[in-house]
Image (cartoon, rainbow, N blue to C red):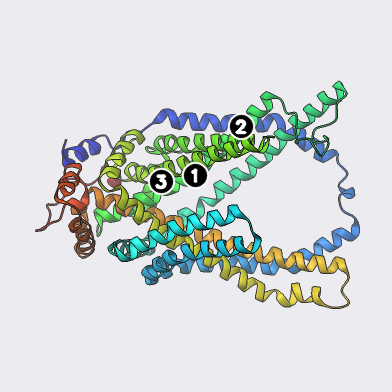
Amino acid sequence: MDMSKERESERAGGRAYKDVPFAVAFVLHLVGVLVVCALYTPLLSAELTDADSDTLLSATQRRAARKAFELAAPYLVFGAIFGAIWAGLWITVVRKFAESLIWVALVTAPLIFVIVLIAAALTGVLALALVGVIGFCLTAAYAFFIIFRQRYRIEFATLTLRTVAGVTTLFPGTLAITFAATLPAFAFQLWWVFTLVSAVFVFVRQADEQRAAAGASPAGAAGSGERFDTGISSAGNACIAYLLFANFWTSQVIQNVVHVTVSGVFGSWYFMNGCVPRAPTLGALRRALTTSFGSICLGSLLVAIVQLVRELIEGARRQQGSLLGALLLCCVSCAVGCVEWLIERFNAFAFVQVAVYGRGFVEAAKATVQLVKSSGATALINWNLTSSAVVLGELVGGVIGAVAVGLASYDQLYSPALEPGAIEEARTLYTALYVVCILFAFACAYAFTAMVSSTVTSGVTTLFVCWAEDPAALFHSNPELHLKFEEITSKFLAELPPGEQQRLHALGGAHARRWTQPPPAPVVRPQELTV
């Protein structure tokens, strides 16, 4: 089936709901969490209510805590505001200095491992030195390869970042939906943490009661030479594993709903620049929460399962008494982590297919496999270059925020701790406040910038997939940008042997399609963008 007929068939079935059973399973799994919450949280609430709150803190301690909060509150607010401002400016920074960011990120990676080697030399830790050597060799070789052999990839990544930053500025709803997603994510985390703590509290208390009935010591009261053992029953451990799985799956679903929404907006811009429908972000969000929600749940489920397996392996490693066994489990955990990373990268491209073409996850995965065959290395390198640049911005934002709050709060929070007549409790209090404010500012600036960066990363992935799938569409929506991309990708094609060029052309790779004349107009637009 050629491309036009394939898209025509997609258009015909565009409004159909995809992967519905997995959407139903996701809702049912949340019902299961609600059942666990209803069973165990009343018991913890009753226990906390019976406790005498006046015995938790003395009057002096309560006055000190109140005074500490009054001193720190303005600087905590300042840190949050500064982080939001930096995140807002970050898009402009990416647009203006995209190439510089990529160059700095390439050079910074080997320098980090040089610092690791210096630390290893000072401490004499062999494992740290081994990590430093391996990391430096890999990052330095990668940087050398990109800079001296394939510098055009930097040009491609630079053009991609600048384009995505410009589109994000044109459609600020993409940023708004990213920030808005933190509300359900935060609410779920609060609910989940309280449910998990309640369940663990009940299971540990039941285990203690069983130990007491048997005349054994309570959980955690074993001697220093024994491993910590809560004594939680198998049913309790299964419930805790279920809650962990629920956290992984729900977090992935929220994250991928945002990714699919942003991808839908970028797809609208790519295929319909100049005639984008009104409120494209709301339209993309509606599709992500309706027709494509089952596909999002299915893709997220795969990552959640791998994350749960890795967490179980880590738990077994922590309980392992043998050094050899712990080392083997550590290696297995590392391997599972690599699998998790690969699935997440694969899903990022597959969900673009879901957002733009309205495919189910299985169909999107098949299309992504074809994309990987035709331009997998290019996609990975482009993702690495752009993601390294945005991660650099996240770290820089966090450091700037921490320094700004540190300087602003120095006189009020840290200077009193340096006064000769200050008592030890006051020194400790003021120092702790100063550190907390700095860490909070770093966390806010880093988190807010990471939200913006996630939008940029989704846009970069979408732009690459759309270009690889249908470069002709960009010619008709944005001829100038199409020419820039074609000039860069032609350099990649020129380096390939004739046989590889034919293979890419057979697979439908974008890099094999060098237009010698204006390409034909696409027969139909991806149906999902017009719904």
**Seen in the image, is 392 located left or right of residue 127?**
left
* Number of other residues with Cα within 10 Å of mark 2, as a class: few under 14, some 14 to 19, many 20 or more: some
Contact between labelled residues 3 and 1, with CB atoms less than 8 Å apart? no
Q: Amino acid at mark 2?
A: Ala
Contact between labelled residues 2 and 1, with CB atoms less than 8 Å apart? no
- Figure check: 267 above or below 37: below
Look at 64% across and 59% down and name the residue there. Answer: 124
Q: How many marks?
A: 3
Instruction: Specify which label sits upstream in the sequence, 1 or 2.
Output: 2
Q: CA distance from mark 1 to mark 2?
A: 20 Å
The residue to which callout 2 is attached is 241
Residue 63 x %, y %: 86, 62
The residue to which callout 3 is attached is 345
Looking at the rendered image, the quarter that the C terminus falls into is top left
Q: Nearer the viewer, mark 1 or mark 3?
A: 3
Look at 61% across and 38% down and name the residue there. Answer: 314
The residue to which callout 1 is attached is 254
Look at 20% across and 46% down and name the residue there. Answer: 504
Looking at the rendered image, the quarter that the N terminus falls into is top left
Q: Amino acid at mark 3?
A: Arg
SS category of the residue bearing label 3: helix
SS category of the residue bearing label 1: helix
**Seen in the image, is 331 located left or right of residue 424?**
left
Residue 304 x %, y %: 51, 37
Q: Amino acid at mark 1?
A: Ile
